[in-house]
Structure formats: C-alpha cells, structure tokens
Amino acid sequence: MKNTSVGLAVVVALAVGGGAGYWLAQRGQGTTTPTVGEQKVLYWYDPMYPQQHFSAPGKSPFMDMPLVAKYADSAADDAVPAVQISPGIQQNLGVRLATVTPGRLERTLQVSGVLAFDERDFSVLQARTAGFVERTYGRATGDVVPKGAPLADVLAPEWAGLQEEFLALYRSGDRQLQAAAHQRLLLAGMPAELIDRVSRSGKVQSLVTLVAPSAGVIQALDLRPGMTVTPGATLARINGVANVWLEAAVPEAQAQGLREGQTVQAYLAAYPGQAVPGKLTAVLADADVQSRTLRLRIELPNTDGRLRPGMTAQVALYLAGQTDDSLLLPAEAVIHTGKRDLVMLAEDQGRFRPVEVVLGQESGGQVVVLQGLQAGQRVVASGQFLIDSEASLKGIEAATAPDTPPVPAPPALHEADGRIVQIEGNRLTIAHGPFLTLGMPGMTMTFPVVDPALVGGLKVGQRIRFGIRERDEGMVIEQINALESQP
C-alpha cells in the first residue's frame, strides 16, 4: 500500500510539472509572439521540445498536451532570433538593465605581508683597537636605544700610549708636529671626540666609552665586563626603526599595473580600523618559482615606534587600469557557461538576445569588455538567467564575438640542468642534460642570452637550471637559476 502511494505521488508530481512547463511556455508565447489578424502557420511544436516540428496540429507525443503553432510573422520577427517580453512580465521577473559605458577600470589588489626591519638603516659597532671591557651599561638585545647611548667602557692601552706622545708634541707648540700627531691618532681609529677631549683636558683618556652609532633596536650585543676586545671584532649591531618594510607577494597574473613609488594603505590587526600610509619602493627583480609570485617591498613610516617587525598587515594596492576608452560592464550581468561568457542584450520593443563577449580584467564589480559589445548598448544585469533559459528553450544561439586576428601563443619554455663551460659576452656554452619537453638529448651547446643582466654573476663551472625558448634567431636563454654546488 505504501509503495502504491509513493508511485501515485510521483505520477501526480510529473503531471503537475509538465503542466507547469506547458503553462509557462504558453504564457511565454503569449508575451513573445503577438497574434495579429490572420496568420499563416508554419509548423506546430511542443514548447518543451522546440527542436521537433510537426506539420499538423494535435497532441504532443512527449507530454500528451496540445501542440503550439508557429506563425509566419513571428518567424519574420526572428530573422535575428530574440526573446520578446512585455514590460509587465519584465517587472514581474525583476529585470534590471545596465548600460555599457566607456571609462577606466580602477583596480585594487589586497595582499598580506609581514613587517621587517629597514635593512638600509643598519649600523655596526666594531672594536678599533685591542682592549678590555671595564664596565657595561645594562643594555641587552631587543632594547631600543638613542644615538650616542653608552654601551660599555673599554680600557685601551695602545691608545693611551699614542695619547702620551700626542700630548708631548702638543705642548711643544710646533703646529706642524701637532697636526701630524693629531692625524696619527685619527689613523689609529681614535674618535675625533676623544681626541678633542684629550686636547682640552691635557690628560690621557685610557678609558674609552663605546656608544651606539645610531638609534634603533639592538640586534646583537657582545660586550661583557672583563672580556678582551680584539681589533675588528663586531661588538654590537643596531637596526633603525624610523621606517619598517612590509614584505608582500602578488601573483604574476595580477602584477600588471604596479608602479614603484605609488602610495599604498596598510592595515594591521594590532590597530584595527587605522590605515598606515606607505609607499611601494621596489618590485624585486626575482620571482618565486614555486608560487609564481612577485615580491614587493613597501616602506611604512614608524614615527611613533608602534610598528614592530614580525607583525602582519593587509595592504591595498591601487593598480593602473586600461585606458579611458575601455568599455565597462557590471560583472553581475555576465553569464559564465564554463566555455564562454554571455550577456543578454536588450533591444527595442522588449526584445532580448544572447551575445557572446570577450572579457578583460575585473575589479570593484566592473569588468572590461574587449569584444562583443559597443558603448551605449544595454544588457540585462538582473534576471538574465531566466531570459537565457527561455532563449535556450526556443533554440536561440548566442551571437559570437566579432572575429579578430588570433594572438599567437608564445613558444613553450624548455628547461634543463647544466654546467657553464664558457662565457663569451652574452653567449653561454653549457654542458646540459636532456630537454624532456623538447626531445633533445644532453650535449654541449652555445646559446645566446636574451637579457645581458642574466649573465651577471655567473662563473665558469657553475651549475645552473636554465630555460630556452625558440625565436627567429634560434634557441635563446630566457631564464637562469643558479643551483647549489654539489659535493
């Protein structure tokens, strides 16, 4: 009994569904093809199967419902196939139109990055003479110090002897000897401030106070009471914090339009809602092979010292768009089929027809139309899927975009490992392994290099991975990556 009820429910559902489809088709015909006086019938068809034509009226063999007549005047209207919908039905369907307008697409790219120290603001404190650390001032790595902050007092016996000679010559009154003695102290590495203090006091300054050469964060500090200091030893490293770098990466496909020097806005999770202005100072020359991204260096001012290296930040990059005469269209108006992009073009008297378009870049809800539309044309921005379904039922095919000369794809890049045998200007002789994608076995060959900058820093015997591409002049090296030396 239960199975019988389920079967009856399925039959009723199918009947209701078929009836609803037929009603929608009849309603669509009533709105798409008006009847005027005597009309010549071309054929009959089932709205659910419009591709099948019948020469006489009757019931459809598919849905067991009356066939619908196709009239001659409607066929004339369909010289350019279209769907016609009355204004009332458009309102019920929520059809909203948008106009194709010329303009410039302003693109904004959101990327994330990590703050780092400004490597240009970096100083090192080294020992200029042998000595012994007598006292330290309680500094440690991570401390922020101003320029000139004392770090340690060092006893410098060698400088003490030189100061004795300087004072003896200074008291002689001979200006030439005084100048020569002063120059000798400078060449020994003695700071000018210390020499002036010796001259003013007339006493030997055996203890030398080592101070921070610049303001910033102490990155390394190797000073302990009682330790021996040797000439040239690095005693401290200090990074400035007046500016910080934001290191970020952008996909290669989205990097078009980046300009060095452009202003950016950074947002840190530590300070929500507060934008930090900055500047894109460099798009680094190398790209990440694995992630296919370009590395960016963004400089952010840190006047109040609240930006700390290691913090994460989101940055908004404004990319230069196309020219002002680009055609812009709301992105919501596009129907993506997976194989092509369509829009429903609105014409006079409530007619709509699908048109294939070729799209460019998209940003901010706008997309660039490269082919298929003209400025001033109107397309359906809301309700286009319902109209497209009706067009599919009527067998209306989308108009293809205008033919344009195809852009030939660049020849493939073929890669292999090799060892540099000889470097002659912009030509490299390489003993390489097989190019698998080219079907070329390993051998020793000479290749021209497309960019002289690729040759810089290379040495004979160095192992590299390089890529070649076929050009008019033959196989040319377009990519070189140094490999780690093998043991």
Image: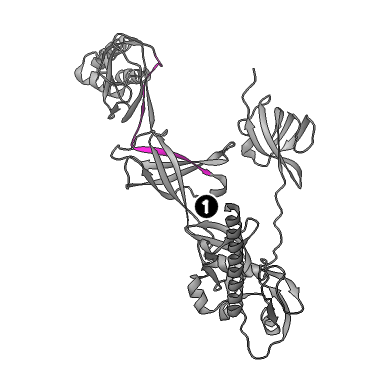
Residue at screen point 72% across, 77% down = 58
Residue that extends furthest to the front in the rendered view of this protein: 1
Q: Please state if 309 lies on the left or on the right of 335 as rendered.
A: left
Please name the predominant secondary structure of the magenta segment in the image: strand
Q: Please state if 71 lies on the left or on the right of 86 as rendered.
A: right
Where is residue 361? Give x, y as percent. Answer: 55, 57
Colour option used: one colour
Above/below status of 138 relative to 267: above
Q: Magenta region: which residues?
A: 231-250
Residue labelled with disc 1: 257
CA neighbours of label 1 inside 10 A, class few (<14), some (14 to 19), many (20+): few
Foreground of the two, 316 or 157? 316
| Quarter of the picture holding the C terminus | top right
Foreground of the two, 217 or 267? 267
Residue that extends furthest to the left in the rendered view of this protein: 201
Above/below status of 458 relative to 76: above
Q: Amino acid at mark 1?
A: Gly
Foreground of the two, 249 or 425? 249
Q: Please state if 127 lies on the left or on the right of 249 as rendered.
A: left
* Residue 427 visible, this angle: yes
Tell me the SS state at disc 1.
loop
Where is residue 468? Give x, y as percent. Answer: 71, 39
Residue at screen point 27% across, 27% down = 148
Q: How many marks?
A: 1
Where is residue 209? Give x, y as percent. Answer: 27, 18
* Residue 415 figure quarter: top right
Residue 194 is a magenta residue: no
Residue 248 is a magenta residue: yes
Above/below status of 38 relative to 152: below
Where is residue 283? Give x, y as percent. Answer: 51, 43
